[in-house]
Amino acid sequence: MGKIDKEKEEISWIKFWIGVSVASMMGLISWLVNNYESANSIMLILDTASILAIAIFIVKLNKIGLKKIKELENL
């Protein structure tokens, strides 16, 4: 496998994990909206912290993916 093919596969892998992360975050947000009044405060705090952690993870993955795309131009 050539270097360009390896880079393309890594970009595809990053796109996959961004998709999984977005789906997870949407699920956590929908749980928060549906259970806001009935859930205890610990669950709400943990859910909010999870949403923020996944959002940071998505931003980091996006930066890595964009960097790899720019590197792909040089190959």
Image: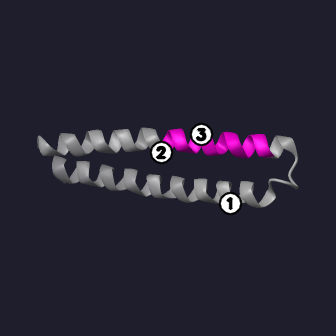
Q: Which label lies toward us, 1 or 3?
A: 1
Query: What type of secondary structure mainly makes up the magenta span?
Result: helix
Which residue, given by chain and number where applicable, does mark 2 sit on?
58
Left or right of 38 on screen, residue 73: left
* Residue closest to the eye, 40 or 13: 40
The residue that appears at 39% across and 50% down in the rendered structure is 14
Left or right of 10 on screen, residue 23: right
The amino acid type found where label 3 is placed reads Ala
The amino acid type found where label 2 is placed reads Ile
**How far apart are labels 3 and 2 at the CA level?**
9 Å
Please tell me how many numbered marks the rendered image carries: 3
Mark 1 secondary-structure assignment:
helix
Q: Is residue 24 magenta?
A: no
Residue 66 % position (x, y): 29, 43
Which residue, given by chain and number where applicable, does mark 3 sit on?
53
Q: Residues within 10 Å of mark 2 (few under 14, many from 20)?
A: many
Residue 43 % position (x, y): 81, 46
CB-based contact (under 8 Å), mark 3 and mark 2: no
* Residue closest to the eye, 27 or 20: 27
The residue that appears at 76% across and 40% down in the rendered structure is 45
The amino acid type found where label 1 is placed reads Ser
N-term-proximal mark, 2 vs 1: 1
**How far apart are labels 1 and 3 at the CA level?**
16 Å
Q: Residues within 10 Å of mark 3 (few under 14, many from 20)?
A: few
N-term-proximal mark, 3 vs 2: 3
Which residue, given by chain and number where applicable, does mark 1 sit on?
30
The magenta segment is: 44-57
